[in-house]
Image (tube, rainbow, N blue to C red):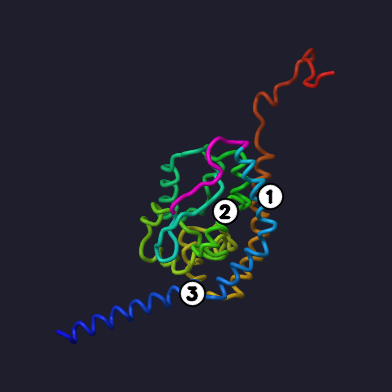
C-alpha cells in the first residue's frame, strides 16, 4: 500500500515537472525578453496611434472602443483578449460560426467575411486589413498571455470544433503575428494554417521570431493596399452617378 502511494506521488511530481518544463519551452526566457524589448521600443509610437484610433472609433460609432472576448491560447487555456472594436456593438456571431465551420471542413482559403459583412464598420475594414485593430493586445503581451509572435488565439466555439491534431497548434503561446500570417494567410486553407502553426511551435528560435516580425510589415502594407484598391473600385451609388441639373444651386455658398 505504501509503495503504491509513493509511486503515485512520484508520478504526480513527474507530471508536474513535465508541465513546468513544457511551459518554459512554450515561453522561453529569450522570447519573453524579446517581447518586453519590443514593447519598450514601440511604446512611444504605439500609444499616440492607439489614441487616434480610439478617437476615430468613438466618433464613427456608438458603443465601447475596446472589444473584449474570451480567446483560447496556450494548451487550451482561456484568457480575455483585447481588440479595437471594428463591428457594430453587440453584433451577432452566428454567421461567423458558420463561416468557420465551413473553413475547417473544406479546402477553402481562410478569407474573412469583411467584404460582405454588414457588421463591420467603415473604419473597421481598414483597421482589420492593416492589423491595427489588434494593437490593444500589447496589454495581453505585457501580462504574459500572448507574445508578439505565435499562432493566433481562437474563439471558444472554434476551439470546440478542433480535433486533437488541430489543437496541437496551441503548444506555444499565441501571438500578434506568426508564421501563418507571413506565409500566405488568407490564401491558405485551414489545414495549411494548422501545419504552419505546429511547425512554428516545434522550431522555436530567436532568429525565427525576428524574421517573422520583419516579414510582417510588408504583408500588412500589401493587405492594406488591397483594401484601399477595392474601395476605390467600389461602384458609385445612383445619387453619385445621377447627372446634375443645370439649374441646380452649387453646394458652396457665395
Q: Which dot marks residue 136? A: 2
Say above or below: 114 vs 17: above
| Cβ–Cβ under 8 Å for marks 2 and 1 | no
- Mark 2 or mark 1: whose residue is earlier in sequence: 2
Q: Residue at x 45, y 45 (%)?
A: 96
Q: Is residue 77 left or right of residue 189?
A: left
Labels 3, 1: front one: 3
Residue farthest toward the top in the current orientation of the protein = 247
Residue picked out by circle 1? 225
Callout 3: SS:
helix
Q: Is residue 64 left or right of residue 9?
A: right
Residue farthest toward the right in the current orientation of the protein = 254
- The magenta region covers 59-70
Q: Position of residue 46 (x, y in %)?
A: 66, 55
Q: Which dot marks residue 202? A: 3
Q: Position of residue 224 (x, y in %)?
A: 66, 50
Q: Quadrant of residue 75?
A: bottom left
Callout 1: SS:
helix
Which one is nearer the viewer's eye here, 206 or 50?
50
Q: Quadrant of residue 19?
A: bottom left
Q: Is residue 65 magenta?
A: yes
Q: Is residue 126 magenta?
A: no
Labels 3, 2: front one: 2
Q: Residue at x 56, y 60 (%)?
A: 176
Amino acid at each position: 500500500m505504501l509503495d503504491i502511494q509513493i509511486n503515485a506521488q512520484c508520478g504526480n511530481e513527474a507530471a508536474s515537472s513535465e508541465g513546468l518544463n513544457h511551459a518554459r519551452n512554450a515561453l522561453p526566457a529569450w522570447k519573453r525578453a524579446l517581447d518586453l524589448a519590443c514593447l519598450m521600443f514601440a511604446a512611444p509610437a504605439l500609444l499616440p496611434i492607439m489614441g487616434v484610433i480610439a478617437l476615430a472609433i468613438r466618433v464613427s460609432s456608438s458603443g465601447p472602443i475596446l472589444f473584449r472576448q474570451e480567446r483560447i491560447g496556450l494548451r487550451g487555456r482561456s484568457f480575455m483578449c483585447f481588440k479595437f472594436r471594428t463591428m457594430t456593438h453587440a453584433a451577432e456571431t452566428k454567421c461567423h460560426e458558420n463561416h468557420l465551420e465551413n473553413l475547417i471542413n473544406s479546402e477553402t482559403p481562410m478569407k474573412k467575411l469583411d467584404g460582405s459583412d454588414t457588421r463591420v464598420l467603415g473604419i473597421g475594414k481598414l483597421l482589420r486589413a492593416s492589423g491595427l485593430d489588434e494593437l490593444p493586445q500589447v496589454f495581453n503581451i505585457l501580462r504574459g498571455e500572448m507574445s508578439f509572435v505565435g499562432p493566433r488565439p481562437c474563439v471558444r466555439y472554434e476551439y470546440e470544433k478542433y480535433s486533437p491534431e488541430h489543437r496541437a497548434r496551441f503548444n506555444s503561446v499565441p501571438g500578434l503575428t506568426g508564421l501563418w500570417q507571413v506565409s500566405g494567410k488568407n490564401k491558405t486553407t485551414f489545414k495549411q494554417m494548422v501545419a504552419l502553426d505546429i511547425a512554428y511551435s516545434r522550431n522555436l528560435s530567436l532568429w525565427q521570431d525576428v524574421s517573422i516580425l520583419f516579414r510582417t510589415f510588408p504583408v500588412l502594407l500589401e493587405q492594406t493596399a488591397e483594401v484601399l484598391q477595392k474601395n476605390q473600385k467600389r461602384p458609385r451609388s445612383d445619387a453619385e452617378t445621377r447627372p446634375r441639373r443645370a439649374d441646380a444651386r452649387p453646394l458652396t455658398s457665395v
